[in-house]
Amino acid sequence: MTATSTAPRTPATATPTRSTNSLTSGRLPSWAPWVTLAGSAGLSALLLGIVSLASDAPFNIAGWAVVAAVLYLILITTASTIIEGRRKGVDRLVTGVVVIAFGIAMVPLVSVGVTVVTNGVSGISAEFFNSSMRNVVGEGGGALHAIIGTVLITLAAAVISIPIGIFTAIYLIEYGAGKRLAHAITFLVDVMTGIPSIVAGLFAYALFALFLGPGIRMGIMGAIALAVLMIPVVVRSTEEMLRLVPNELREASYALGVPKWLTISKVVLPTAVAGITTGVMLSISRVIGETAPLLLTAGVATSVNYDLFNGRMMTLPVFAYSQYMNQGIPATAFIDRAWGAALVLIVIVMVLNLVARAVAKFFSPKLGR
């Protein structure tokens, strides 16, 4: 019996870890962009402060933001090109331009929101929601008639335009591929997308004037005008969402013997329901603030009107316009009511968007079991 000898194992020695400097390893540290941004902001503030003191002019905030952004792009691009290379430097330049463009786009949005909320809160009260402008010539009164008119007219426009738009998009994608009629419809939809809103109002007014005579004003006329503006938006958005549905889903349904109409209603539409709902809400948001077509069709009223087919009907955009343009005594009451109407209109749009997101989430196909 031979004994086996094994070589003694040498204990493993732990290799010391070295902390590498990101600058020498060809990589900027994570804090470098923020320090560069802060330095650019401080340096631009110093330069513009000296200029404002020398010229005895107020400090230019917009100029400070522009100078700081340009200086930041120059500094971060130069530093990244020297340390990380030209490719990474260009990447940081494009990233900075995109972020700055996003900030510029947010400035008017935030400004409008802050302005409307600040000025609209003073015009909001319990009386604003439970009374109309009937027999009111100065202070007091509210926008109840305008809120009801906006809801009814927009709801009627949605009832008219949403089925027409969705069915038109279904025909273009599922049935009309390559047909002349589909090309003609697509062309007309593209033309309707760019028509001014006043043209839609003139169309609705002329249509009803042919049958009921000139000078007619009704809420349903405003709904028709808004529907003309909504239909192309619904068609285009629904068309794009239906294109995103994979053809494999349709083919799998056809392979099981399911007819085409049932495949569209049970497979295609539920798959695209989230995008379709978003498109519908975009169309509603596009028309709910229209003023010119509603001035021509629904007119101006001071009392509550629940009948779309009888009499004039006030809406929030027209109410805000009329209150601001026809100021009485005291003028502050009219201006406050105009800003309050604008704030209520924005809140209505936000609520509708939240409802649409909830509907899309509830009806969208579930991926898990």
Image (spheres, rainbow, N blue to C red):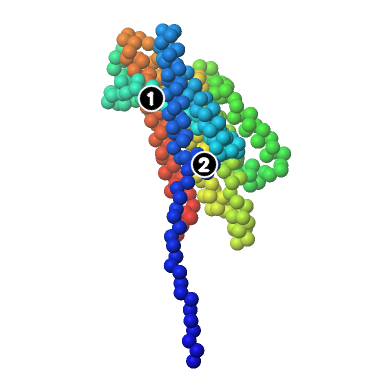
Q: Which residue is mark 2?
A: 24
Near-viewer residue (153 or 241): 241
How far across and down, in percent of the image, does residue 240 sit?
59, 41
Q: Is residue 131 visible?
A: no
Tell me what residue is drawn at x 45 percent, y 48 percent: 19
Residue occupying image coordinates x 54% and y 19%? 213
The x, y position of residue 22, in whole percent, is 49, 42
Q: Is residue 338 visible?
A: yes
Within 10 Å of disc 1 (Cα), the crowding (few <14, some 14-19, many 20+) is few
Indicate the secondary structure of the residue bearing disc 2.
loop
Q: Indicate whether 256 appears above or below 329.
A: below
- Amino acid type for the residue under numbered disc 2: Thr
Check the picture and name the quadrant holding the C terminus: bottom left
Query: Which of the two marks, 1 or 2, is nearer to us in this view?
Result: 2
Q: Quadrant of residue 353?
A: top left
Disc 2 crowd, CA 10 A, few/some/many (<14, 14-19, 20+): few
- Looking at the image, which residue is at 42% across and 27% down? 110
Q: Which residue is mark 1?
A: 114
The kind of residue tagged 1 is Val
| Pointer 1 or 2: first along the chain | 2
Q: Residue furthest bottom?
A: 1
Q: Calculate the distance from the C-alpha at mark 1 to the C-alpha at mark 2.
A: 47 Å
Residue 30, compared with residue 288, is above or below; it is below
Which residue occupies 50% across, 89% down?
A: 2
SS of the residue under disc 1: helix
Q: Which of 14 and 321 lies nearest the eye of the viewer?
A: 14
22 and 39: which is toward the camera? 22
Q: Position of residue 294 (x, y in %)?
A: 48, 22
Foreground residue, 80 or 146? 80
Tell me if 174 is positioned left or right of 309 in this view. right
- Mark 2 and mark 1 in contact (Cβ < 8 Å)? no
